[in-house]
Amino acid sequence: MLSIEMAPGIHWIGVNDRTTDLFEGMWPIQREGVSYNSYAIKDSKHVLVDLAKAFKTDEFIERVNEVFDVGSIDYIIINHTEPDHTGALPILCRLSPQARIKASAKAKEILEDFYGLGDRVDVVTDGEELDIGSRKLVFYSTPLLHWPDTIMTWDPKEGILFSCDAFGGYGALPGAIYDDTCEHLDFYREEALRYYANIVSLFSPVVTKSVERLLGLGLPLRMIAPSHGLVWRKDPLEIVRLYQQWAGLHGTAAEVGVTLLYASMYGNTERYMNAVSQGIAAEGVPVRIFDVARTHSSYILPSVLRYRGVLIGAPTYESGLFPTMVHQLDMIERKKIRNRLTGIFGSRLWSGGAQKEFAALAEGLKWNVVGTREFRGGHGDAFVADGFAFGKEFAQKVKTGG
Ligand code: FEO
């Protein structure tokens, strides 16, 4: 994409990445892609705000040169040091040897560790201003959103908050960069939630505090310009409110609904699961179904974050819980998604053991187990009818809170 002037002197100079398979080496983005949004401010000083991943450096430099010569940079603001935003930094520092990096104290340490560039950094503190000519940029400290180094940069002249990862999302940009010029806004909202669940949700208590502080500042926001995904300008607070809502979901404010996670070796647990889902639907409760052996946790976590109920369907395997289910529950535990209503059903033949292992995992997650079923194989109408009744009963508990 070419650079886009967002306001007088302020240019989006991001790049799309449709090549990387796994964001952070873990989260799939093969189908969705991602953008590394960067911004160039052409004032008396030439300023860049956040950069791009290293393998996109050539393309990124082309974008910079559309706005000002890449050798003429005065300041590079690094809101966050993760290499998807700093990979291009070593080459830019060589092309603009006079450029000073503005970043937090923790970022200075990390930039030294990553690139040996600590001596190029001027540490900025919360509320500090940077005079660049016709405006003074303001830095706000937002540690652990999602690394300890993170800051945001505010342009009071144009009302733009450069928020880096916060308020970002997966999804390469579709030619348009704004929420109000994007044809598929629902896709970007969903990808923002997936990004939140994957990358940010562990720090939800920090998000809540940071958003409260941001709203308390009463900044006259015209745009929220994150480092991934759409720039929000139609209603810039929409994405802030969504983040606030998602941060709340981490605790006890999850919505009525069920994430139905299942695994099945020969179809018995799956047959029961289908009946369970019917029982849940009969209660008018939303249900999302995932085969955990075939679905990356990246796509499962948003549903677990969103819904109050998490129902597990898994057979015993080698006297324990089916291993692919254990993996998914481990990913949920790492994100510390607490206070869910849960239950388990599944097939066993000789020893059993899945339910016992799940009970221990649920205790660690601080989930309330409100229903269990175990069966040997499974056939006939009574088997399916029991699954329907089990699902219905669980959905009723989800509606009433247990
Ligand atoms: Fe987009 Fe935390 O890097």
Image: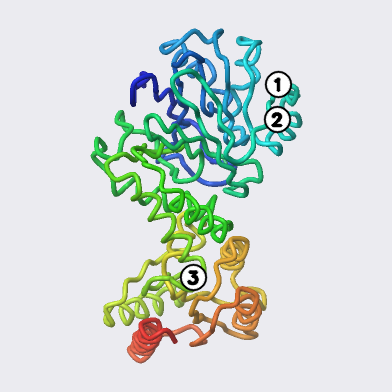
Foreground of the two, 281 or 379:
281
Kindly report which numbered mark, 3 or 1, lies closer to the viewer in this rendering.
1
Distance in Å between CA atoms under marks 1 and 2: 9 Å
What type is the residue that disc 2 sits on?
A: Leu
Q: For mark 2, does the 10 Å Cα neighbourhood hold few (<14), some (14 to 19), or many (20 or more) residues? A: many
Name the residue tied to disc 1.
120
Foreground of the two, 235 or 282:
235
Name the residue at 57% across, 84% down. Answer: 349
Distance in Å between CA atoms under marks 3 and 2: 47 Å
Image: 215 above or below 313: above
Q: Looking at the picture, how far across and down is residue 162, in whole percent?
A: 47, 35
Can you tell me which quadrant of the image ligand 1 is in? Answer: top right
Name the residue tied to disc 2.
111
* Marks 1 and 2 close (CB-CB < 8 Å): yes
Dot 1: element: helix
Q: For mark 3, does the 10 Å Cα neighbourhood hold few (<14), some (14 to 19), or many (20 or more) residues? A: many
Q: Looking at the picture, how far across and down is residue 245, in whole percent?
A: 41, 61
Name the residue at 63% across, 45% down. Answer: 147
Image: 399 above or below 295: below
Of callouts 3 and 1, the N-terminal one: 1
* Marks 3 and 2 close (CB-CB < 8 Å): no
Of callouts 3 and 2, the N-terminal one: 2
